[in-house]
Image (spheres, helix red, strand yellow):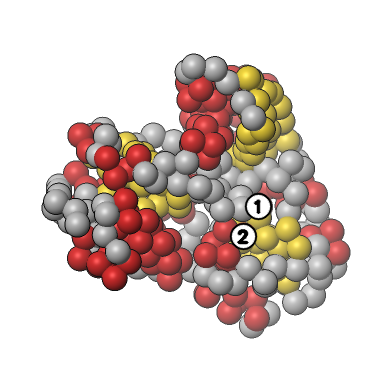
Amino acid sequence: MPTQPPVRIGARGSKLSLAQAGHMQRRIAAALGAPPEEADRVAPMVIITTTGDRVQDRRLLEIGGKGLFTKEIEEALLEGRIDCAIHSLKDMPAECPPGLTIAAIPEREDPRDAFLSLKADRLEDLAQGARLGTASLRRQAQSLHRRPDLDVQMLRGNVDTRLAKLEAGEADAILLALSGLKRLGLGHLPKSLIDPVEVPPAPGQGALAIETRVSDQDAPWLEAIRCRDTTLAVAAERGALSALEGSCKTAIGAHARLVGERLSLIVEALSPDGRHRFRRTGEVVLGAVAHDQARALGLDLGRQIQAEAGDLIALPD
């Protein structure tokens, strides 16, 4: 049995967050040497409601950006009320607050976007002027690039809420992360999946992040949870995010693939209306400083796009 104090896990209260935190709770318990039935004792969950959860009637960019899904949880970490936090990596800002770090990234789920509709099998099959529901600026811009006739409607809320709005006819189609649907046991719902090369997902999509205090990042239990391939892939994607000063005001997609030691990366950024799209691809053979090389690839491609695109990809203030 573990000899260290319990590892208190901070998580949001949504059904998806609880499913993700529950999965990692069992992994953490195993890493601590405890059986599954002891998970609540050795790795208790602490539910924290964030500003992003409370405010559901506006886009995140209107109320402060991605950090509103992490702010209260990170405050609890810094104050010592919890020992780690489980986040969807795509919801995390490009940089952690001082004193905190992403200490472990486990194996990634499928990173693709999923297309859900009661009226069409693919985005291309939607009727002229159809209503597409999304709160993501990236999904808005990428969809308008492919279908400029679409009427993109702001659609926030948890997965159940968005599915209910689709069922009620408030949108003709919606786009969701396939990873979240699969973690909720809803992987059968999409009508089709979006090609991640043609339409890259959000940097880090499909991956979970375990955030800790910097002083705790070398705790032995964390090593048992890390996935090298996922960590390297998302290092490249988030490097691009950092270079483009990624936030909810910038439509950025990135998709990295690791085959052997060869890491390839696609990065794109678009104007909010989808009219302008800037893409770069690159690859690197990883060596002794693989993580630094992966991040450098993302930074380089992101900076190239930034230099070409300038203000075209930023949402006006």
Front residue (pair 6, 16): 6
Q: Would residue 68 be visible to someone looking at this image? A: no
Front residue (pair 44, 85): 44
Say which residue appears at 61% left-offset and 50% top-offset. 111
- Residue 9, given in percent of the width and then of the height, sits at 27, 57
- Residue 177, given in percent of the width and then of the height, sits at 59, 58
Say which residue appears at 51% left-offset and 22% top-offset. 290
Q: Secondary structure at mark 2?
A: helix
Q: Amino acid at mark 1?
A: Arg
Proximity of marks 2 and 1: CB atoms separated by less than 8 Å? yes
Could you classify mark 1 by the number of other residues whose Cα lies within 10 Å: few (under 14), some (14-19), or many (20 or more)? many
Q: Which residue is mark 2?
A: 178
Q: Would residue 235 be visible to someone looking at this image? A: yes
Q: Amino acid at mark 2?
A: Leu
Front residue (pair 119, 311): 119
Q: Which residue is mark 1?
A: 112
